[in-house]
Image: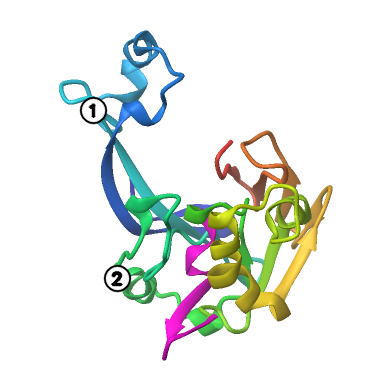
Amino acid sequence: MSDRIKLGNATVTRVVEWECDIGTSMFASTPPVAWQDNADLLVPTFLDPETQRWRVVMQSWVVDVDGLTVVVDTGVGNDRARPHMPPLAGLSTDFLGALERAGVAADEVDVVVNTHLHTDHVGWNTTLVDGGWVPTFPNARYLMPEADYRFFAPDGPGTSEGARILFGDSIFPVSSQIELWTDDLQISESLRLRPAAGHTPGSSVLWLDAGTPAVFVGDV
């Protein structure tokens, strides 16, 4: 696909952080026949049938609409300690360079949407500078589902070692810019956040309709 498309009055840009191949064994509860039955959807773009390796792309979407620049999900991030997910630990990608080459200036981003608060959706909320975590997007509102925030926070029922580390490097450093939301949130005339089925309590999707509709699905 093109890395930039027009959808009505909106421009949507894909910014890739990282690509990797992982085994389908990650989905231990998925029967082998399911991969075969859905081969027409998966092969060859997403699945190598010979090696049973699944191609994963960590990426963000940038939506320019209604006078706003909106970043949807912020990937894994560099320099992270991730004992609960070793393949995502200590990355050193050129994501910020990719943003710049896509014409996106970090200090001109108005809104950051975290569709849910998992490691691979919040990492570039922050950047490591001189040993400390600072907001990557210093002038943005960071929109986070309140249900996820309350659940995964260090005093929440779903907290864990991994969640505490994640909050420490990717959530708490942007506290002054966070807006928690529940139910629906109308961001602008063309953008709306809504709860959706997923694998966290606050899983959400972002609806765009600026003449041509689209939905950014997080991990639905």
Residue sitting nearer the eye, 135 or 163: 163
Q: In which quarter of the image is residue 146?
A: bottom right
Identify the image quadrant of residue 175. bottom right
Q: How many marks?
A: 2
Marks 1 and 2, the one that precedes in the sequence = 1
Label 2, secondary structure: give it: loop
Residue stretch in magenta: 121-134
Task: Work out whether 107 lies above or below 117.
Answer: below
Which residue lies at the image location 75% right of the left edge and 48% below the top edge?
Answer: 157
Q: Where is residue 25 in the image (x, y as percent from the top left)?
A: 33, 26
User: For mark 1, does the 10 Å Cα neighbourhood hold few (<14), some (14 to 19), or many (20 or more) residues?
Assistant: few
Residue 94 numbered mark, or none:
2
As shown in the figure, which amino acid type bears the numbered disc 1?
Pro
Q: Secondary structure beneath disc 1?
A: loop
Q: Nearer the viewer, residue 2 or 70?
A: 70
Examine the structure image and report whether residue 125 is included in the region drawn in magenta: yes
Residue found 62% across the figure and 83% down from its top: 139
- Front-lying residue, 3 or 77: 77
- Quick one: which residue is furthest to the bottom in this view? 130
Residue at image location 61% in from the left, 58% down from the top: 114
Specify the quadrant of the image occupied by residue 23.
Answer: top left
